[in-house]
Amino acid sequence: MPQPAVAADDPSPSIPPTPAVGRSVPRKDAAEKVSGEAKYVDDLTLPGMLWGRTVRSTVPRARIKAVRLCFDTAGFTVVDHTDIPGRNVVALIEEDQPFLAAGEVRHIAEPILLLAHEDRDTLMAAKVEIDYEILPPVLDMLASTEALKRLSIDKGDLEAGFAEADLVLEGEYRTGSQEHVYIETNGMIAVPEPDGGITLMGSLQCPYYVHKAIKPLMDLPGDRVRIVQAETGGGFGGKEEYPSLIAGHAALLARKSGRPVKIVYDRGEDMWATTKRHPAIVRHRTGVTRDGRLTAMEVDVVMDGGAYVTLSPVVLSRGCIHAAGAYRCDHVRITGRAMRTDTPPNGAFRGFGAPQTLFAVEAHMDRIAEALGMDPVELRERNALRPGDTTATGQEMQEDCAALDVLREAVERTDFHRKREEYRGTGRGIGLSLFFHGSGFTGSGEVRLASRAALEATETGVRILVGSSEIGQGTRTMHAQIVADAMGLPYEQVETALPDTAKVPDSGPTVASRTCMVVGKILQNCAAEMISRLGGLTPMEYARRHGPLVVSQDYVPPGDVKWDDDTYKGEAYAHYGWGCNVAEVEIDPDTFEARCTAFTAVEDVGKAIHPVLVRGQIEGGSAQGIGWALNERVVLVEGAMANATLTNYTIPTTLDTPPMDIVIMERPGKHGPHGAKGVGEMPIDGPAPAVVNAIRHAGLDVREIPATPEVLMAAAPSEEAACASS
Amino acid sequence: MRFELNGQEVEVDAHPMRRLLDVLRVECGLTGTKEGCGEGECGACTVLVDGEPVCSCLVPFAQAGGTSVVTIEGLGGKHPLQRAFGDHGGAQCGICTPGMILAAVALGPNPTLEQVRVGLAGNLCRCTGYEAIYRSVLGAYEAVDDRRPAAEAPAVGGGSKADGGAAFGTGADGGRSDVAGAGRSRSNGSGADAGAGSAGKAGL
Amino acid sequence: MKTALGDLELRQPRTLDEALAMLRDDGPLLPLAGCTDVYVQLEFGVMPARRFMDVSRLRELRGIERMDGGGLRIGAGATYTEIVRAPLVAQRLPMLVAASREVGGVQIQNRGTLGGNVANASPAGDSLPVLAAADAVVVLRSAADGERRVPFTAFHTGYRASVLRPDELIVAFEIPPVEGEQWFRKVGTRAAQAISKVVFAGVKGGPRPRIAIGSVAPTVVRAFRTEEALASGASIEEAQQVFGEEIRPIDDIRSTAEYRRRVAANLLRRWWVGQ
């Protein structure tokens, strides 16, 4: 990439550097990743390091009667809940999840005991027997009577809305669990410090979440707990909250042994024990006029939260807020509940509840169109949110509301209507989905987070100090672009500090499509502040003359964003991104395999700070969504994943992934840097309903995902002769 | 036991059943080879043994004796594929990248899209949806000055996999063309030549 | 890897005779070559064997050659990649090329061997229906008895069980000339790197139809009765009925018995009737 050759200490003021924003500048982390030099947690070895292992329950619900160590304990460090110096709770939203089971287990794979040894083989061979008093488990969310969270959103007068309707259509839609399958499994190294403190290095998205969880566990003040992110091989939400648990385990073993301890999960353990996407059952009852106007939408959302609260309340919240889809309707009621079951807790996964509810509403919209004898595009055109319309929470849409733009672009470039006719009766199908995704934390979440970012002037340029993590999405690169332009510096002179809680402020978790829009904006403000402090000097000149200069800024809530947590009314998100996906499928009439043969995504991200990164998010999220739609089935037995291998949980390969046509649309929002909104999550919202709507177009009424061949077969007309058995 | 590692003759002492993956990462200290699953499914641990990509998690160390092994470190950081994976967004989180690049090396220069799709079917990536990886591999061997900004490149189209079952004739030549079309063309370079100064080997 | 290395032993014979002597005098030893099954079981800690013998370098197990009378001899140590690249196999047994291409990714094809697939005795082995439909003969050898030949269809005796004795090695497969049009279809859990949910090989247009199907019973099924029915002019519906009686599919984590049954019947129709 051409860059002006500028000496580090003498940027000529007459030649401003080429702006970095909007260009696909070289990734900051590219050279290390392509050369194999990047160090992930399992690549790190410390002197005297022990290996750690987690002994877990093999039953869903029981009292622990006895734990027997059936091995020679010489050289082993053994930790159970009685070794915990502080409080045995993973501090997150609620404090109900223990780090180590104390007398009772509430799901399969719950951690009970920790072992460490310097020889990994000896560690793995150690046998532990646990006697249980088995209790009856609740494994089905519909059978559960214990809600982790309930909420409702009300707008208008539902009964009046149904009274206006010519047609009322009901439907139930189900989405399965989904495993993240980051290719790097979870791992953590704990190092006991001489002052009694603890340092943790690992694969994680949110260093300050880990920090928050370790303090009470270890009964340590914040300055004695240090969390450092190692290079992280994918997250997708799977390394949002769970790393706190692994960090706690490693810390307990390190404290007891007095030596560094590394815990790295193998793939089986990672899939069996860690969080997944919440399975959901969404019921719709919708009133619509003969000409296709939505008059009333009643939506009931049930999610399986698993054994502990973890993030379920906020996953449910985002899911419900998106449950009425990208449509205007005056009369809406959305009710939601996340139910407790004796299964491993479900957690954050790209989209965070919205993909489940958007699947339901988009599959439902095609059924409404079918019932009305109307073109699904026309139905969406008729009802899509426009500037000035309000969402279910009463949020008024601004000028950047791009629902119609993305829909029209996608329909036109795929020649949707022609193919819709042409494919009829051929075993092929084409379908679409229209969706939106709120950027940043829900409602007052960002205000409560009160994120902070900082910039440091150094002798070579500026250094970004944020807790936001690079997990493949390009945080380091994108932040450096924003800061470079805000400072008027060449991109090469901006570097990013390693996320290390001893050195960087808490810029909030790296989740919720907020790292560009929210944290990027704070960094812009930092740059403005720094420029005002430099007195006309460059950062390099300043650092040489006066030493390092650090400026920090806090999140400033946009003045026009109002939210009421009690009534679920107001501006749920500062901005929404908008998307339309078109999927084409071919269904094998003999094997019922649906193959996605072409995929188009038109997505509005406000501003593409780095087009290659944005496209990477859209393509990657789309593939993950297509996998969820067709292939990725978590087989649950006693609430635990029975197919916890990459052989049997089948994510898409090169041959499963369709060619993709990606269009990045830019409808800038007011609040993000350069108008940027979120991009990380939205791409997984649309693929599943687009694929299932294509399957519907090909003639099969499918209302659940994954739409495996077995599911398609059940939807196909039965063939008695073919089915006949002996 | 002696074998050639990234162009150098080395002698390593390890249990004969130890996974080649562990020998490379621990005994040899080359951590660029990654473990993603331990069951030969994800391809993150791909290395070249005598020029052929294999999953090093499924290779007993004893079988590496006398072979030539190339890991990501053996490409020296300057291979056209390494540069292209950086430029075209083929590397996101980076954990599949070393294995992906080595599997792509084995395709030789200028593979077709279909050859890339088939040749990389044993390497899982969860970040990219593979599209940026195709652009990286297909773009790697374009002349350096001819590089266009990757973002503006049109989306890559793709062939589709025939699914109707494969029928074959019984004639003498039946199926032959099918083999030729399989797209498993190989690198010309052998693993022995990887490493510094191997510019003459287009495949490595 | 869940299996501790300390317990494991690996012998490395240099010749076939040495290997057979080891099996006779120093067994039990589990032969391994491409290790694509053995190491997966070691990874999961479910491999019962602790003592292994590396047969990957035995030259006597390699090679793909023409036999007198037009048959084909494929060494047990031939990898899928070697099979895919062999013009001889493409000419004579193209359905084996098709099956080999669908075994795992390139990395697995480079290592996995035909002998290993057969010895592993999984009913989902992709090459097994091809060998069954081709009337292959398994060539076994032991130090005690020399060579013996077992029809492939008699080789597997149950789920992961076979007539292979602990002192024997599979050395090769002999495949007589296959007359007729060969057809192969694998229905997996995804497009690549899949385990078969149903895997079908058929030959028609020769003296008599031949059908073999995997993943629908404890062993691969050679559907002799269905072949008989078709040969004697039964309708496809009648043949499907018979076929349904010859298979015994089950529910497992990858699919259901009902799916396997219906897809098996559908594939039979597609293969026999076309479309």
Image (cartoon, coloured by chain):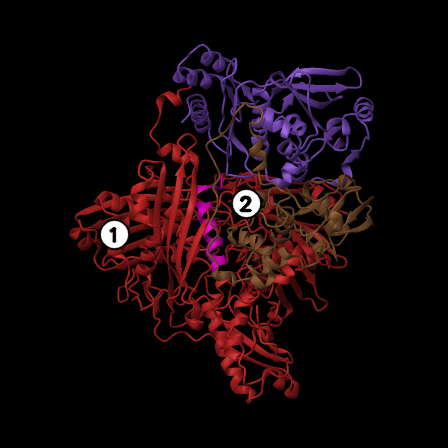
Chain colours: A red, B brown, C purple
In the image, the segment drawn in magenta is A614-635
Viewer-proximal residue among A367 and A584: A584
Asked whether residue A616 is drawn in magenta, I would say yes
Disc 1 marks which residue?
A: A378
- Between marks 2 and 1 in the image, the one whose residue lies nearer the viewer: 2
Which residue appears at 70% of the width and 29% of the height? C77
Give the quadrant of the C terminus of chain A: top left
Q: Name which quarter of the figure residue A477 lies in.
A: bottom right
Disc 2 marks which residue?
A: B117
At label 2, the amino acid type is Arg
Q: Position of residue A692 (x, y in %)?
A: 37, 43
* Residue A227 higher or lower than A64, as above or below: below
Q: Residue C98: which disc?
A: none
Q: Position of residue C61 (x, y in %)?
A: 73, 27
| Magenta highlight: main SS | helix
Q: CA distance from mark 2 to mark 1?
A: 37 Å
Q: Name which quarter of the figure residue B143 lies in.
A: bottom right
Q: Position of residue A567 (x, y in %)?
A: 31, 63
Would residue A310 be seen by someone viewing this image from the given angle? yes
Asked whether residue B198 is drawn in magenta, I would say no
At label 1, the amino acid type is Glu
